Image (cartoon, helix red, strand yellow):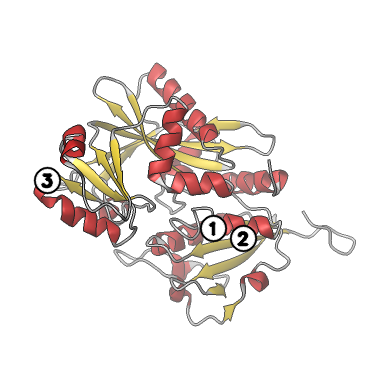
Amino acid sequence: MTQGTGTQRKTRVAVVFGGRSSEHTISCVSGGSVLSHLDRERFEVVPVGITPEGGWVLGKGDTSALEMSGRNLPTVRSLGELAPIEPSHALADVDVVFPVLHGAWGEDGTIQGLLELTALPYVGPGVLASAMAMDKAFAKRVLQAAGLPVGTFSVLDRRQETLSLDERDRLGLPVFVKPARAGSSVGISKVKDWADLDAAIAHARETDPKVIIEAAVTGREIECGVLEFPDGRVEASLPAELRIVGEGVDWYDFDAKYLDDVCEFDIPAKLDDETARQLREMAVTAFHALDCQGLSRVDFFVTDGGELVINEINTMPGFTPISMYPRMWAETGVDYTTLLTTLIDTALARGTGLR
């Protein structure tokens, strides 16, 4: 907490949301939720929005414009006409930044690099960890090198148009075709016939020229939150299971995640004690393998044979009112406001620079 004239003033927290990625709207919902749950007795809050074009604006105190309304998702422009401001001015006199940015140009190490250059503490992993986790191909390779189980996958860079016949044989059907550096299931297709592959690749490349193609893993979808505390402890939350119950929906796409009432959740997941222990331990191992700090959400499959497979790791998971990360920690005994305070205190304790 920064000293004022004779008395302590509140810690000034800039909550940055929106951004240039395809996850702009979800980031706005997350940002609004964080703003409404921060402890105002401890923190003075500075809302900072980034438009889809990359312009920075100072938001207002009212967060209602950042809430979901039915199937309508907010944007930074939902806040009204706001005057643009330079990033240096938006972050002036701020003690710490909470970058609630999902996807490229935010969660991928870019804003982390900016904040490192200005020696401004921030919530979440640093530049390298953020960049590696954002790129699903690199994240899987690092996890593999650490001895952690990941599914079978192949990567197409911008020079490769499609999969070879050998790669198709290795992966089998069905496959999931994904932008390599995106989240919230944006740009993802499930391919059950190779005749549909090229269209799925083209769809993914509307978001990212680099594409990852993953063999489908049959099993239960389990998530686990990881949290670093100010004293350096790293712990895993109780895991959660998501189950799709809507008719005609066979995977967790964008609409299923945010817009349609087709999913049910078990928190904690109904796992035997040993599987739950292994999964939580593996989540922390994945956190350290990518050199994360602050927080992450690790997504798993638990196969019918009881094997654990890591799907991906997310370094700035959703903080919307329905997001699993805060819900898992609430069930573990850390309520939303305490969770946010812990993340900010950890960022302040860690500081910036090489660590």
Q: Which residue is mark 1?
A: 110
Where, by quadrant of the figure, is residue 216 drawn?
top left
- Marked residue nearer the N-terminal end (3 or 2): 2
Residue type highlighted by circle 2: Leu
Q: CA distance from mark 1 to mark 2?
A: 7 Å
Q: Quadrant of the C terminus?
A: top right
Closest to the observer, 257 or 288: 288
The residue lying at 56 percent from left, 31 percent from top is: 235
Which class describes the residues within 10 Å of circle 1: few (<14), some (14-19), or many (20+)? some
Where is residue 69 shown, x and y percent of the image? 35, 66
The secondary structure type at the circle numbered 2 is helix
The residue lying at 50 percent from left, 38 percent from top is: 329
The residue lying at 45 percent from left, 56 percent from top is: 102
The residue lying at 36 percent from left, 19 percent from top is: 272
Q: Which residue is mark 2?
A: 114
Closest to the observer, 45 or 351: 351
Q: Which residue is mark 3?
A: 194
Where is residue 41 shown, x and y percent of the image? 69, 56
- Contact between marks 1 and 2 (CB within 8 A): the answer is yes
Which class describes the residues within 10 Å of circle 2: few (<14), some (14-19), or many (20+)? few
Which class describes the residues within 10 Å of circle 3: few (<14), some (14-19), or many (20+)? some
Residue type highlighted by circle 3: Trp
The secondary structure type at the circle numbered 1 is helix
